[in-house]
Image (cartoon, grey):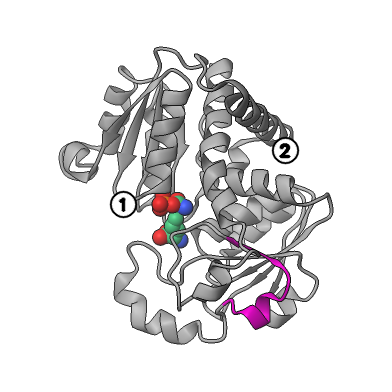
Amino acid sequence: MNFRDIDDLTTDELTTVLDRAGTIKADYEESGASDLLDGQTLGMIFEKPSTRTRVSFETGMTQLGGHAVFLGPDDIGLHGREPVKDIARALGRYVDFVMARVFDHDDVVELAEYSEVPVINALTDDAHPCQTLADLLTVREHFDDGVSVAWVGDGNNVCQSFVLGAAMSDFELTVATPEGYEVDERVLDRAAELGSAPAVTTDPETAVTDADAVYTDVWVSMGQEDERERKLADFEGFQITRELLGDRALMHCLPAHRGEEVTDAVLESDNAIVWDQAENRLHAQKGLMAWLAERE
Ligand code: CP
Ligand code: NVA
């Protein structure tokens, strides 16, 4: 069983993982660390930088009685030292789970194909399902059923996994992107298959009209630095300002680029639930790993 994107889980499995995350969160708050993953090791492959992902996975393993090994670009040489499939086969002989943050989504697919232990996608250019797990947990904690969320910004990796996660959950989603930055058609088709495709628009105002929460992410993702000037121009009008947000909650996967996709004032306001999202990375991933370990 792998976690290449959120829809590797069935809708029932997603509910189970989120329930498990909630229980693990409450148990940790009540009685601290456990031995659920005693003696188990997570291998963490990073081709891109990270704060939340690295620290939440590493801390999560410690809190469950396990251990994590960090493998940065200089350690593992994903496209230099040996083929991806050989890395997958070797790592699987040592560790109990592999987590990978890479550029090319196909690398996670290949790792999963050749690994004899579960492979968890910790962000690719196309998807960020661990973020979606945390987001769904956060939505559950903050809102009742039937909540409505608007995504305003790039139809990027975080957005695409969130679209699939929303389709598997019972909340409404509207996605506003500038022309040319839409969610991939295949993701929209998959969302429709899973339950419901989001409403799509190029107008942020329309997207937020009936929303309880507004979710945004950076306009220039890791690896897109060369596109910066063009993207900043193309995303004009998509910034989450006090006026656009109104009294709605603000979601952001972080890191944020203040003054670009969101104003400093909005991010610092009481509307922001972004720190709960960040914290829930820890609990959601602990829930996922505990659930995966029990299935193996
Ligand atoms: N949201 C998220 O994945 O943060 P990092 O890039 O800091 O891991
Ligand atoms: N879309 C962003 C998310 C970072 C967590 C990126 O890929 O850089």
Res. 88 image quadrant:
top left
Residue 64, horizontal then vertical, whole percent: 48, 21
The magenta stretch is 240-251
Total labels: the figure holds 2
- Please tell me whether residue 246 belongs to the stretch shown in magenta: yes
User: Which amino acid, by three-letter code, is at mark 1?
Assistant: Lys
Q: Which residue is mark 2?
A: 11
Q: Is residue 281 left or right of residue 119?
A: right
Q: Is residue 102 left or right of residue 33?
A: left
Residue 191, horizontal then vertical, whole percent: 69, 54
Residue 81, horizontal then vertical, whole percent: 15, 39
Which callout, 2 or 1, points to the residue nearer the camera? 1
Marks 2 and 1, Cα distance to the nearest angstrom?
30 Å
Q: Secondary structure at mark 2?
A: helix
- Against 112, residue 161 (above or below) is below
Instruction: State the residue at coordinates (66%, 83%).
Output: 243
Residue 89 versus residue 94: which sits nearer the camera? 94
In the rendered structure, find residue 177 and report the number of the disc placed on it.
none
Is residue 74 at least partly visible in the picture?
Answer: yes
Q: Which residue is mark 1?
A: 48
Q: Secondary structure at mark 1?
A: loop
Residue 76 versus residue 204: which sits nearer the camera? 204
- Please tell me whether residue 77 belongs to the stretch shown in magenta: no
User: Which amino acid, by three-letter code, is at mark 2?
Assistant: Thr
Instruction: State the residue at coordinates (46%, 30%).
Output: 60
Residue 39, horizontal then vertical, whole percent: 39, 12
Instruction: State the residue at coordinates (73%, 55%).
Output: 192
Instruction: State the residue at coordinates (57%, 56%).
Output: 274
Sequence-wise, which precedes: disc 2 or disc 1? 2
Mark 1 vs ligand 2: CB below 8 Å:
yes
